[in-house]
Amino acid sequence: MTKSALHARFKTDTKLEEQGVWVDFGEGLRVRVRRFKSRVVQDASKKFNKTEVGVIRKGGMGEEAATDILVRIIAEAVIVEWQGVTDENGNELEATFDNKYATLKELPEFRDALFEQSVSMDNFKGELLKESEGNY
């Protein structure tokens, strides 16, 4: 029996969303990312947004504060692990919160690329994608 086109196109693997998938950026740089809508990421989002409640109540949050929250969420919950991430001198960096946070602050284009990968539905189809090929 063939799966519906709707399910083939939009169904994702929730286990992959929570555990993360490896994304290859080339030249030995790989990052395992969770889906941005995963439970783990949403919990981190609530945690970091809660710390800014006072700022929001006093008239809103500026772009810099909002970006900092996004960086913290990606560093804590989106990036599960990484390989081949180095500092400017080529020294390998462990995937600690501090290293992830500093790298994402220093390299906003890397941060944006990771965010895009974490919201891409196609990254989290896994075996479901293989099963549905040809059903569009």
Image: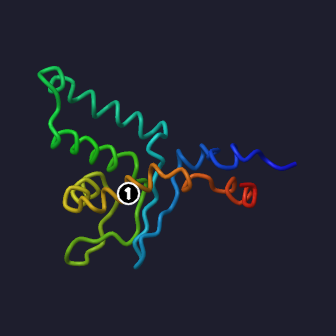
* Outermost top residue: 57
- Identify the residue shown where x is 47% and y is 49%: 34
- Identify the residue shown where x is 40% and y is 49%: 78
The image shows residue 122 at horizontal and vertical percentages of 56, 55
**Of the pair 127 and 88, the residue shown nearer to us:** 127
Say whether residue 23 is left or right of residue 68.
right
Q: Which image quadrant: the C terminus?
A: bottom right
Position above or below: 26 against 129: below
Report which quarter residue 81 is drawn in. bottom left
Which residue is disc 1 drawn over? 114
Instruction: Report how many numbered discs are placed on residues in the image.
Output: 1
* Outermost right residue: 1
Residue type (three-letter) at the residue carrying disc 1 = Leu
Report which quarter residue 86 is drawn in. bottom left
**Of the pair 47 and 62, the residue shown nearer to us:** 62
Position above or below: 15 against 90: above
Say whether residue 122 is left or right of residue 128.
left
The image shows residue 119 at horizontal and vertical percentages of 45, 49
